[in-house]
Image (cartoon, grey):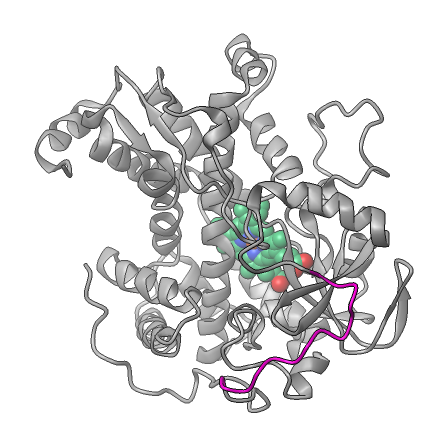
Amino acid sequence: MTHPGPPAPADPRVPAPPASVPPASVPPPASRCPAATPLYGPQLDGDRMPVLYEELRRAHGPVAPVTVAPGIDAWLVLGHRELLRLTREEQDFSHDPRRWSLLREGRVPADSPILPMVGWRPALLFADGQQHRRMRAAVSDALARINGHELRRSVRAAAEQLIASFARRREADLVPHYARKLPMQVITGLLGVDERTGQQLVQAIAGLAAANADSANASKRMGAILLALIEEKRRRPGNDVTSALCAHPAALTDEEVLHNLVVMFTAGNQTTVNWIATTLRILLCDPAFRSSLTGGHLSVDDALDLVLWRFPPTQNFPARYATRDVEFGGQPVRAGDMLILGLAAANQDPEILPADGSPVVGNRSHLAFGAGPHTCPAQDPARLITRTAVDTIRHRLPDMELAVDERDLAWIKSPWSKGLAALPVRFADPQLPPVHSASSQSGEPR
Ligand code: HEM
């Protein structure tokens, strides 16, 4: 389905951008901190990010001044201990972007690429204290009702269909053809969205994430699709996360259900895409890991953990806002300043790494899922989706190997997401179940 559908009617439950945002034509203000390092722009090199974090740590210590978009100053929290404090002490560090001083002063241009990520919504990710706990209870309880066996079955079925669609070619780029397709398909299923609506939703979310001139329309389309879904689930509840959210004793309004669904989509999709692709990269490229797996010393779960430590799918996460002036990691943080969770840098903090640099097997004290009251509530289903995706393709394409030199694999140019741009593989002898090998003969794209 490629048609975006008719323009959605405005709905009062889908909020407009904050009134304090100036028009897009207003030039962005200059950074207030001359020492701030830009985390954006054409010079950003996805492969160099770990080096950049160590340079920042050496120059500034555990909290470093950065700019995350033109004129948008923030603090990047690189220290493991400091990141634990940032995530745990919400009386000092709020989730609510309405406290952000640059926004309150009207200094964030309406077309700033940071806005779609941090604009306030009535959802758990942007709330503190009681309000957060209320929405968090609904989301966590709804996620806890997911049946692991059914989820595994549906991931495996979707994975096998995708593999069948490219198996005859004996080669594939596993990022666009596998990792990028699977999580969205599975997450829409979990939320109780039918396939056709799911595809419309995927397009609307992609339009929103593109942060361009069509993003406002994409946001309206997404709002209209989700509202129709919520009305349907209130009328006829099913066995899905949306129905559980609607029926939860926390009594979320339609608007709250809608925006919490948006957070689940946006927080769950790209992260899981990255986790799948990076784990496959390790299994394909790391000879020690490959032989350990066949020899039974290390499991796929160990590979999943290694990714969370070394290449966390979200390398930096926006944001928290200081509620008061505070000295933090040796820096003079002011009330209203934005702080970014440096998840990848904190995982590599020399203060917590083993002295011999050995891989951290069996230890899950990494910060890939955040920490504190907002720690990712979907860790179990996300792991199950990723493990099943990785297991299924390993078993269906047992002789799969990398089709390019490992040095040609590049990370995407993003300060936020840690994902591979491509993962080309080839294989000679796919082991498909009979039903899929039959359908792949007729339905395979050329
Ligand atoms: C099915 C997939 C997933 C879903 C539905 C999901 C959902 C969510 C939600 C709703 C939140 C907000 C929690 C709150 O504010 O209380 C969240 C936060 C977060 N999630 Fe996930 N997530 C998924 C997968 C992942 C994966 C694979 C990763 C990375 C390994 C991840 C990393 C995070 C991080 C870093 C946060 C922010 C924590 C913070 O602000 O302190 N998530 N996720």
Name the quadrant where ligand 1 sits.
bottom right
Q: Residue at x 46, y 37 (%)?
A: 276
**Residue 343 placement (x, y as % from top left):** 69, 49
Q: Residue at x 46, y 22 (%)?
A: 284
- Quadrant position of residue 34: bottom right
Does residue 75 lie above or below 257 as drawn?
above
**Residue 33 placement (x, y as % from top left):** 78, 70
Q: Residue at x 25, y 80 (%)?
A: 7
Q: How would you classify the magenta stretch by its main secondary structure?
A: loop
Does residue 311 lie above or below 235 as drawn?
above
**Residue 29 placement (x, y as % from top left):** 65, 80
Left or right: 202 in relation to 70? left
- Quadrant position of residue 221: bottom left
Does residue 342 lie above or below 201 as drawn?
above
Q: Foreground: 56 or 96?
A: 56
Instruction: Give the quarter of the figure containing the C terminus.
Output: top left
Left or right: 374 in relation to 271? right
Q: Residue furthest top?
A: 295
Instruction: Give yes or no for residue 32 being in the magenta stretch.
Output: yes
Note whether residue 120 is visible: yes
Instruction: Give the quarter of the figure containing the N terminus.
Output: bottom left
Q: Residue furthest left?
A: 442
Residues shaded magenta = 24-37
**Residue 391 placement (x, y as % from top left):** 42, 27
Does residue 186 lie above or below 196 as drawn?
above
